[in-house]
């Protein structure tokens, strides 16, 4: 079994492990009005999904994600800044941590090691240690459920029943050979295509995540957008031209999606169907918003894994990212400079 497929099938266990790791960390129950999650790539996606969860449950806690070298200038004492880097070596995240230290902001760290773990110990920063040995993009349950468990401990929300449902839905999907076959068949249709991922407003973060997984796992170009916004601009790109004839559109759907969004999706499908190679849909499973979103992400991960196999690519490797990191290490050496600056 490839490592990536093994990681995907461990999602139910990762959910439970993330909750337990957070509980064992004995984090202080801080008071804050906003949560800023600083991270890149697979380490940031937990914040994205958590923000979806807050909106979908109607919980009035603002969660923002910062994918930059610098912190937003408006961050003040009412914000908890969480630094999420699976490796602990992500230079953008390290840069933001150094700035947070200078500005005296309240911080916590989620990582498996690296400089961030060392800094957590050195500066006494609340820290959740994740298990090592995974690909960062395969640790979504860790990055998401660490956040959700900490928010529960701080009295911001309690999704215990819905987490139980989510684990069951993910476990059932893992054992569902029909769904596995469906993702394999979809991969066969979509192989070699540029893929546009669209979702309703409830699954904005899921659309971004699926696009990223297509890039990293499948080694294919992809884009993402959200209804209703895409109907105010991107849909015009599907007018009479031949640019899109080799493209596939992937729609993330939900039986309980907003009625107006449902009508928009159906109308958009009819407008673009003849302009692209194909339009396919993934439908969420489960009752709760959390289970629905995680079921879509699980199915999409399987799809991107099988797309990689169709392309003859390794879903585990990301050669361009590795090459770029090596160049930046040689030219900038950002991590060592930040380390020296914090001493």
Image: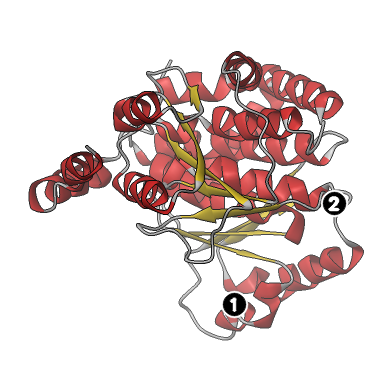
Q: Nearer the viewer, residue 149 or 73?
A: 73
Coloration mode: secondary structure
**Residue 57 tag number:** none
SS class, disc 1: helix
| Circle 1 Cα neighbour tier, 10 Å, few/some/many (<14 / 14–19 / ≥20) | few
Residue 338 is situated, as x and y percent measured from the top left of the image, at 23, 45
Q: Which mark is residue 234?
A: 1
Q: Quadrant of residue 343?
A: top left
* Residue toward you, 24 or 308: 24
Q: Is residue 12 above or below residue 150?
A: above
Is 43 on the left-hand or right-hand side of 198?
left
The residue sitting at 51% across, 28% down in the picture is 126
Q: Nearer the viewer, residue 107 or 285?
A: 107
Is 69 drawn above or below residue 23 in the view shown? Answer: below
The x, y position of residue 163, in whole percent, is 77, 26
Earlier sequence position, callout 2 versus callout 1: 2
Q: Position of residue 189 (x, y in %)?
A: 54, 48
Q: Quadrant of the N terminus?
A: top left
Disc number lying in front (2 or 1): 2
Q: Are marks 2 and 1 in contact (CB under 8 Å)?
A: no
Callout 2 environment at 10 Å: few (<14), some (14 to 19), or many (20+)?
Answer: few
Residue at 42 percent across and 54 percent down: it is 103
- Judge whether 143 appears above or below 130 on screen: below
Q: Is residue 279 above or below residue 314?
A: below
Q: Nearer the viewer, residue 11 or 157?
A: 157
Question: Which residue carries the number 2 mark?
Answer: 58
Question: Is 326 on the left or on the right of 43, as rendered?
Answer: left
Separation of residues labelled 2 and 1 (CA atoms): 28 Å
Q: Residue at x 58, y 40 (%)?
A: 46
Q: Residue drawn 33% across and 50% down? A: 92
Q: Say how many tags the image has.
A: 2
């Amino acid at each position: 079994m490839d490592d990536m497929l093994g990681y995907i099938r461990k999602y139910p266990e990762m959910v439970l492990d993330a909750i337990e790791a957070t509980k064992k960390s004995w984090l202080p129950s801080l008071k804050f009005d906003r949560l800023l999650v600083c991270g890149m790539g697979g380490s940031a996606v937990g914040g994205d999904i958590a923000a979806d969860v807050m909106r979908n449950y109607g919980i009035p806690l603002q969660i923002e994600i910062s994918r930059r070298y610098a912190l937003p200038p408006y961050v003040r004492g009412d914000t908890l800044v969480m630094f999420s880097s699976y490796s602990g070596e992500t230079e953008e995240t390290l840069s933001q941590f150094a700035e947070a230290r200078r500005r005296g902001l309240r911080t916590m760290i989620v990582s498996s090691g690296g400089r961030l773990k060392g800094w957590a110990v050195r500066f006494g920063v609340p820290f959740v240690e994740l298990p090592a040995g995974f690909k960062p993009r395969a640790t979504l349950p860790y990055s998401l459920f660490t956040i959700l468990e900490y928010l529960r401990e701080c009295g911001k929300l309690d999704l215990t029943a819905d987490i139980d449902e989510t684990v069951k839905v993910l476990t059932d999907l893992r054992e569902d050979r029909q769904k596995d076959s469906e993702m394999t068949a979809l991969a066969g249709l979509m192989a070699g295509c540029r893929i546009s991922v669209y979702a309703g407003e409830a699954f904005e973060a899921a659309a971004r995540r699926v696009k990223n997984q297509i890039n990293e796992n499948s080694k294919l170009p992809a884009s993402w957008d959200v209804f209703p916004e895409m109907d105010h601009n991107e849909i015009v790109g599907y007018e009479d031209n031949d640019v899109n004839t080799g493209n596939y559109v992937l729609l993330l759907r939900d039986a309980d999606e907003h009625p107006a969004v449902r009508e928009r999706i159906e109308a958009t499908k009819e407008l673009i169907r003849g302009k692209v190679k194909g339009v396919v849909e993934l439908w969420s499973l489960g009752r709760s918003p959390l289970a629905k979103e995680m079921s879509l992400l699980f199915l999409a991960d399987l799809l991107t894994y099988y797309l990689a196999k169709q392309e003859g690519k390794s879903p585990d490797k990301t050669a361009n990212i590795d090459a770029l990191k090596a160049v930046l290490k040689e030219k900038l050496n950002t991590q060592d400079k930040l380390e020296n600056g914090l001493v």
